[in-house]
Amino acid sequence: MSDALTYIRDGAAIYERSFGIIRAEANLARFSPEEEKVAVRMIHACGMVELADDIDFSPTFAAAAKAALRRGAPILCDANMVAHGVTRARLPANNPVVCTLVEQNVAALAAELGNTRSAAAMELWRNRLEGAVVAIGNAPTALFRLLEMLDEGVARPAAVIGMPVGFVGAAESKAALAADGRVPYAIVKGRKGGSAMAAAAVNALASEKE
Amino acid sequence: MSDALTYIRDGAAIYERSFGIIRAEANLARFSPEEEKVAVRMIHACGMVELADDIDFSPTFAAAAKAALRRGAPILCDANMVAHGVTRARLPANNPVVCTLVEQNVAALAAELGNTRSAAAMELWRNRLEGAVVAIGNAPTALFRLLEMLDEGVARPAAVIGMPVGFVGAAESKAALAADGRVPYAIVKGRKGGSAMAAAAVNALASEKE
C-alpha cells in the first residue's frame, strides 16, 4: 500500500475525470445533447462504456422527464436501492421519491394477486402515476405490470425509466415498453440494467449540473 | 402488450430459472462450491454471465465471511445503496447493517481530512472494524482509505467485499486490496462493480438458501 497516497481525493475532480474518460471512450454520437448527459451518467454508474450501444431513448423522453421533474413530479421507484440512489440535492422541486415495496400490505397483496411483491407494490402507485417519472431498476414484473395497468386505463406517467436487470423477463419487458409507445421511455436493451443505472438516469435528468 | 399475460409472476420460480440460466451459461468451474454461490448471485445482480471471469476471491474469503456473519458481525457499507441491497431476512444473526456516509459530521470531516465523504465516513467505522464484514460497492476512495487505515493499525475486518465501480481509482483500489493480502477479500477486477454486486455477495454469504 506504499503508493496509496497518490490516489485522487477530491470528489469533484473524480467526477470530472470520470466523465472525461467516458466521453473519450464511449460512442455517444447518436444521442442528443440532453440524452448524452443521461447516457454518460448511466455509464458512470456501471463502469462500462460499451453500455452506450444498449441504451435506447424514445424521441421525447429526455424533454418529458426533465419537464416533469421541474414541475415537481414524484419519482416512483420499484426498489429501495433505486430510491436511495437518487441524489436528493439534485432534484429541482424537492420531488417526492416513492418506493412502495416495503409497505405493510404488499406481501399480502402479492399473494392475493398471484404476482411478485414488486408488481403488487405498484397497485399503491395508482393515484400517483399521472405525470410521474417512473424508475424501474430491478424487477421485470414491475415493468410488465405497469404495461398491464396502462392497458387497464391508469393515468399515464410523464416518462418511464425502464431498466430492470436479469435473466428472466428483463429483456422482454424492456422490449415490450419500447414497442408499446404510449409513454416516453429510456431503456437498456437486453439483460443489463439495475438500480444504479436507473438512479443515474434520474440524477442526470434532475439537474443541468454534471 | 397482448402477450403480457405470459410473463412469470412467481418470485421463487423467477429466481430458480435465473440461477439455472446463469449456471448453464457462466464459466464457474474455477470456483469452490461456496464461492460459486457468491459468483452466481453477483451475476444475477448485473445480468452479465461474463462477470465470472472478473471475480477474484482470496482462498479464505468465503469461509471467513460466512463465519463472521454467523457470529453476528456487522456489515459495514460504503454507500446507502449497498446497505439497502442487503436482504435483512437472509442475515443469520440479525447483523447490524451500517452505513455512516450520511451521518451529520461526515461532510465537515471530509473537508478537514481533504478526502471524499466516502473516505471520511470510514473514520466512524474504527471501533466497529474488528471482525466485521466490509462491503464497498461504490467509492474507490473508501477502499483506498481502508487500506491506509490498516497501515495505521486499525483492527482487521474478517473479510472485505471490494467492489467499487468506475473509471478513476476503481481498478487500482481493487488491485491494491488483492495485492495487500492482510484481509480475506472478494473483488471484481477492473472498472465493473457496484452496490448491487456488493450487496449480492453479502446476500449469498448470509444464507445457504438460494
Image: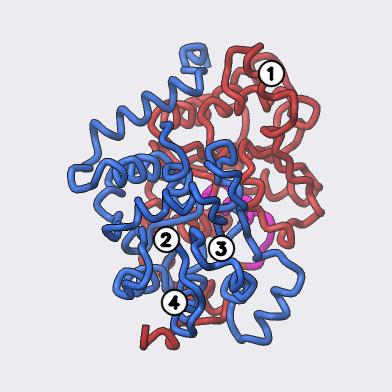
Chain colours: A red, B blue
Same chain for mark 2 and mark 1? The answer is no
Closer-to-camera residue (A92/B58): B58
Same chain for mark 3 and mark 2? The answer is yes
Q: Is residue A132 left or right of residue B54?
A: right
Residue kind at label 3, given as amino acid type: Asp
Residue B97 is situated, as x and y percent measured from the top left of the image, at 61, 53
Of pointers 4 and 3, the one earlier in the residue sequence: 3
- Disc 4 is placed on an element classified as helix
For the residues carrying marks 4 and 2, which lies nearer the camera in this image? 2
Q: Quadrant of residue A208?
A: bottom right
Chain of the residue on which disc 2 is drawn: B
Residue B118 is situated, as x and y percent measured from the top left of the image, at 59, 70
Residue kind at label 2, given as amino acid type: Ala
Of pointers 3 and 2, the one earlier in the residue sequence: 3
Residue B14 is situated, as x and y percent measured from the top left of the image, at 44, 24
Same chain for mark 4 and mark 1? The answer is no
- Identify the residue position indicated by label 1 in the image: A108
Residue kind at label 1, given as amino acid type: Ala
Q: Is residue A99 above or below residue A116?
A: below
> Among all residues in the image, which is located at the extreme left?
B29
Dot 2 surroundings within 10 Å: few (below 14), some, or many (20 or more)? many
- Disc 3 is placed on an element classified as loop
- Identify the residue position indicated by label 2 in the image: B159
Dot 3 surroundings within 10 Å: few (below 14), some, or many (20 or more)? many
- Identify the residue position indicated by label 3 in the image: B78
* Residue ID at (31%, 62%): B189
For the residues carrying marks 4 and 3, which lies nearer the camera in this image? 4
Q: Is residue B134 above or below residue B69?
A: below
The reply to whether dot 4 and dot 2 touch (C-beta < 8 Å) is: no
The stretch of residues the image draws in magenta is A196-209
- Identify the residue position indicated by label 4 in the image: B147
The image quadrant where one finds the C terminus of chain B is top left
